[in-house]
Image (cartoon, rainbow, N blue to C red):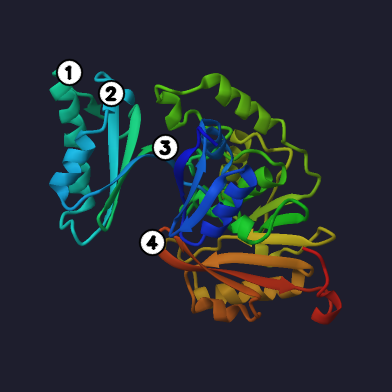
């Protein structure tokens, strides 16, 4: 289409396929997967929709210019040549994030950010005699500079704050899971709301909330206070409102159960607070219980996704802990597809059950595996056609 432009949605390692599928279903054009990102084409309306509706995107970047550069000085000249007053005024603020992957550039990303900032500041100083200030917390315009080999791409960040900041999480526990990762785990597990759902170690409730939004077709960022594009000079508020309302009109009321379990009263309180912030109380039930002393009370196929303690920030006796996970699943949770993420690749061996899937992921800096165990009712042969 005539008004389409190139965008890049960034994500976490291992979620590229899920993000590409989300973009396809939303209606993006010319989708290409990269490492931790997916490029695509769309118009302003699609950019608004992508920010509101993508569950596994961290940022949606609009391509401003791409050009060849051989060194920092050439990069400065080409960034300085962009007509920046089309995008920001001298009395507004900006911030720059840079990523460098090039043998031609011996400096680090921080230096490239500073050099880019100088190029923009000098553009205004030369033209107007004054320049916009830098504000790294709440700028009017966020700019991304990516250098790969001899190619430099300048992006405008349409998201503003990272899209994992949905607006509902005010209470967290010791090791909270990122909202984008939580949504990605659910989608990798095939959860779509057509089965019951359990998080048996729910902590502050992130996975439960993301599950409820998936099940009820609630846009993940509908509670966001602001997106970056709302500060842009060409922001089309009536179009944004129309897209916002159209997405809300697709919300459903899913009858399947979503249950969270945790043995810590403090975690239960935090989960309930976050669920209330997200206005999802009617869809999620929280139970204060020890998973290892619990059993499945739901009839029919159920998907379980959880983020057990890794031992990195929460002290656990890993071998015994993972053995108890396996014993509990086998004894008390038949007819369940159980998934969890862990960085303790040795401890998985003590679960004592055979994995049906093992997906490499990262949780922050930690190399992890997202593992699946099919817990059948009776023999595997008798139940292998069960629909999940």
Closer to viewer: mark 2 or mark 3:
2
Dot 4 crowding, Cα within 10 Å, few <14, some 14–19, many 20+? few
Q: Quadrant of residue 108?
A: bottom left
Could you tell me which residue is drawn at 56 percent across and 53 percent down? 20
Could you tell me which residue is drawn at 15 percent across and 48 percent down? 72
- Pointers 2 and 3 in contact (C-beta within 8 Å): no
- Quadrant where the N terminus lies? top right
Residue 298 screen position, x and y as percent: 81, 58
**Residue tagged by mark 1?**
128
Residue 284 screen position, x and y as percent: 70, 44
Q: First in sequence: mark 2 or mark 1?
A: 2
Instruction: From this view, report whether residue 17 is shown above or below residue 146.
Output: below
Residue 315, numbered label: none
Q: CA distance from mark 2 to mark 3?
A: 23 Å
Closer to viewer: mark 4 or mark 2:
2
Q: Relative to 163, is 186 on the left or the right?
A: right
Give the total of numbered labels: 4
Dot 1 crowding, Cα within 10 Å, few <14, some 14–19, many 20+? few
Q: CA distance from mark 2 to mark 1?
A: 10 Å
**Residue tagged by mark 3?**
161
Q: Quadrant of residue 128?
A: top left
Q: CA distance from mark 3 to mark 1?
A: 29 Å
- Quadrant where the C terminus lies? bottom right
**Residue tagged by mark 2?**
85
The residue nearer to you, when weighing 63 against 361, is: 63
**Residue tagged by mark 4?**
365
Q: CA distance from mark 4 to mark 1?
A: 44 Å
Q: Relative to 166, is 98 on the left or the right?
A: left
Residue 36 screen position, x and y as percent: 44, 57
Closer to viewer: mark 4 or mark 3:
3
Please tell me whether mark 3 sits on a helix, a strand or a loop. Answer: loop
- Pointers 2 and 1 in contact (C-beta within 8 Å): yes
């Amino acid at each position: 289409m005539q008004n389409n432009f190139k965008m890049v949605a960034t994500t976490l390692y291992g979620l590229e396929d899920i993000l590409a599928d989300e973009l396809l279903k939303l209606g993006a054009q010319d989708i290409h997967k990269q490492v931790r990102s997916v490029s695509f084409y769309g118009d302003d309306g699609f950019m608004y929709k992508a920010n509101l509706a993508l569950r596994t995107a961290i940022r949606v970047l609009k391509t401003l210019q791409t050009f060849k550069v051989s060194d920092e000085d050439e990069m400065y000249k080409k960034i300085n040549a962009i007509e920046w007053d089309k995008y920001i005024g001298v009395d507004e603020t900006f911030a720059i994030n840079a990523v460098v992957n090039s043998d031609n550039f011996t400096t680090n990303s921080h230096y490239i950010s500073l050099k880019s900032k100088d190029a923009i500041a000098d553009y205004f100083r030369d033209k107007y005699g004054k320049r916009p200030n830098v504000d790294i917390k709440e700028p009017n315009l966020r700019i991304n500079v990516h250098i790969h080999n001899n190619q430099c791409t300048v992006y405008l960040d349409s998201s503003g704050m990272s899209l994992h900041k949905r607006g509902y999480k005010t209470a967290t526990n010791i090791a909270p899971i990122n909202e984008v990762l939580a949504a990605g785990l659910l989608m990798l597990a095939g959860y779509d709301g057509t089965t019951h759902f359990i998080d048996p170690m729910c902590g502050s409730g992130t996975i439960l909330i993301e599950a409820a939004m998936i099940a009820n077709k609630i846009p993940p960022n509908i509670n966001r206070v602001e997106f970056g594009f709302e500060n842009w000079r060409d922001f089309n508020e009536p179009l944004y409102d129309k897209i916002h309302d159209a997405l809300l009109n697709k919300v459903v009321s899913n009858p399947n159960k979503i249950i969270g379990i945790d043995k810590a009263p403090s975690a239960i309180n935090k989960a309930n607070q976050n669920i209330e912030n997200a206005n999802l109380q009617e869809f999620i039930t929280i139970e204060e219980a020890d998973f290892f002393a619990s059993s499945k009370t739901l009839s029919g196929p159920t998907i379980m996704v959880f983020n057990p303690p890794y031992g990195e920030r929460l002290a656990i006796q890993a071998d015994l802990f993972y053995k108890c996970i396996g014993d509990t699943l086998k004894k008390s949770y038949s007819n369940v597809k159980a998934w969890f993420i862990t960085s303790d690749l040795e401890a998985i061996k003590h679960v004592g059950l055979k994995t049906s899937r093992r997906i490499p992921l990262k949780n922050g800096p930690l190399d992890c595996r997202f593992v699946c165990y099919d817990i059948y009712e009776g023999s595997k042969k008798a139940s292998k056609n069960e629909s999940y």
